[in-house]
Structure formats: structure tokens, C-alpha cells
Amino acid sequence: MGKFELYSDAKGEYRWRLKASNGQVIATGGQGYASERSAREGIASVKKNAPDAEVFEVDK
């Protein structure tokens, strides 16, 4: 099972990435989001195609 990671980058923008169970990044948002809510909405959109993936927040 994969997992989503939600984090902020050096510019303070929110980003997400989807990692496979082996830790390999298999998808990213491809952009920085101004708010955590917007980043979570991006994750929600992707989760429609990966309904079992979990969301994890990670510290930079």
C-alpha cells in the first residue's frame, strides 16, 4: 500500500508526493500550493484513483 506525504518546502509552499510501499516516489503534485487545504484537495483528487493510499505529514 502506498502513502501520501504532505510537507512544506523551503519557500513555505505545501507539496505532496505519493510513495510506493518500497519508499519510491511514484507521483507528486508537481507544484507548490499556497495553502495546506489546496494541497489536501490535490491529494483528494488523486485518491479517487488510489483510494487505499494513506496521508502522512512529514517534517522537512
Image: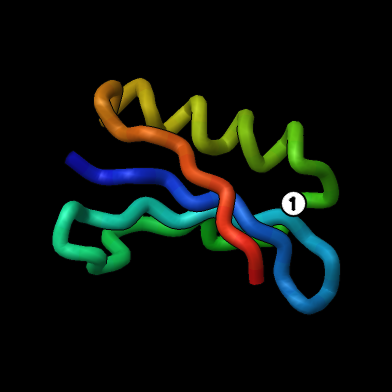
Give the number of callouts: 1
Q: Residue 33 placed where, x, y %?
A: 74, 51
Q: Is residue 48 left or right of residue 59?
A: left
* In front of the other: 35 or 6: 6
| Image vertical order of residue 28 relative to residue 42, above or below | below
| Image vertical order of residue 36 relative to residue 5, above or below | above
- Callout 1: few (<14), some (14-19), or many (20+) C-alpha neighbours within 10 Å? many
Instruction: Say which quarter of the image contains residue 53.
Output: top left
Q: Residue 57 placed where, x, y %?
A: 57, 48
Q: Residue at x 34, y 44 (%)?
A: 3
Q: Residue at x 17, y 40 (%)?
A: 1
* Amino acid bearing label 1: Tyr
Q: Residue 29 placed where, x, y %?
A: 52, 54
Image quadrant occupied by the C terminus: bottom right
* In front of the other: 15 or 3: 3
Q: Is residue 44 left or right of residue 32?
A: left
Q: Residue 17 placed where, x, y %?
A: 45, 56
Instruction: Say which quarter of the image contains residue 49.
Output: top left
Instruction: Say which quarter of the image contains residue 32.
Output: bottom right
Q: Residue at x 31, y 56 (%)?
A: 19
Q: Mark 1 = which residue?
A: 33
SS assignment at label 1: loop
| Image vertical order of residue 13 relative to residue 41, above or below | below
